[in-house]
Image (tube, rainbow, N blue to C red):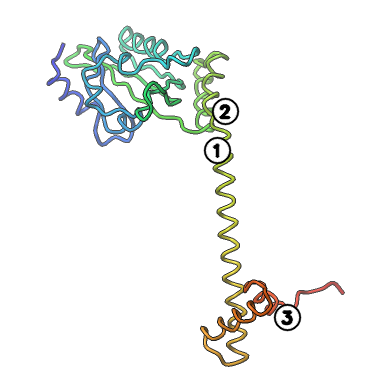
Amino acid sequence: MPDQTSFGLIARSVVPESSAMPMLLLDPTLRIRGVNSAYERATLRPRDELVGELLFEAFPDNPDDPEACGTHNLGASLETVMRTGRSHDMWVQRYDVADPAQSGKFVPKVWGPRNSPVYDHGELVGIVHQVEELTDLQSTLSAMAHALEADDTLSPAEQLHVLAVFAAALPAERERLRALSAENEQLRQAVETRDIIGQAKGMVMERYGLSADAAFRLLVRLSQQSNTRVVEIARRLVEIDQPRDTAL
């Protein structure tokens, strides 16, 4: 078996640093021999902690998840690659990773893994493990559909286990959408307010020959005297000058 230096040379060609696809190189004992930056980012682990470690010691199943099957399924896929010498698509796999910010906690993750053999002078010397992180429900359902077309679909229990990642995220996603909607409404109101005040200011400037600053000060003074917001004063002036159409 090649030494780490040799694996380093192999890794530079089969696990390119420039690739946006998360990838790592395993030797036949499933020891990690090479990692690219995309894999570091996706798994929340620096390569210095990974290179030289056995795969399933570096990435164990989530002990708090009784349905976790990542190590079993990935192990079976890697064994298939070494036995057949051909690539194997796993399509969809839930495989949580340790949260570096909270000791003992895991971050739910869903992946689309592909495992491919690596040969050196005709000898199988390793496996490239590459993963596409599936971060939304639509892409996950699409991957499940491809698996079904390939007659390699997940069991009902595994499908529920995968979809639970997105079900758990729904409340947070709804809150994010509500916050985004509120922010957009505030922006719309701000634009409308600016436009209304701009129209009213232009009318005052034209009618009384005032500068822009003087016209705005006049609107502010009217607001203070009537205890009414400037935008409401402006809206009334615009409506007086441009009355709304009414039904005949």
Is 63 on the left-hand or right-hand side of 169? left
Between discs 1 and 3, the one toward the N terminus: 1
Q: Which residue is mark 3?
A: 240
The percent coordinates of residue 92 (x first, y second) are 46, 22
Q: Quadrant of the C terminus?
A: bottom right
- Numbered badge on residue 23: none
Judged left or right of residue 160, residue 41 is left
Which residue position holds label 1?
A: 173
| Residue drawn at the location 26% of the way across and 30% of the way down | 36
Sequence order check, earlier mark of 2 and 1? 2
Q: CA distance from mark 1 to mark 3?
A: 44 Å
Q: Name the kind of residue labelled 3 in the image.
A: Ile
Residue 202 position by quadrant: bottom right
Q: Look at the image and tell me in which quarter the N terminus lies.
A: top left
Establish if 141 lies above or below 4. below
Q: Which residue corresponds to the image point at 57% horizontal and 28% vertical from the top-left? A: 167
Q: Amino acid at mark 1?
A: Glu
- The amino acid marked with disc number 2 is Ala
Q: Residue at x 34, y 28 (%)?
A: 100
**Mark 2 and mark 1: span between their CA atoms?**
10 Å
Q: CA distance from mark 3 to mark 2?
A: 53 Å
Secondary structure of the residue carrying numbered label 1: helix
Question: In what element is the residue under mark 3?
Answer: helix
Residue 32 image offset from top left, x and y in percent: 25, 18
Q: Residues within 10 Å of mark 1 (few under 14, many from 20)?
A: few
Crowding at mark 2 (Cα within 10 Å: few <14, some 14-19, many 20+) = few
Residue 196 versus residue 117 in the image, above or below: below
Q: Are marks 2 and 1 in contact (CB under 8 Å)?
A: no
Residue tagged by mark 2?
A: 167
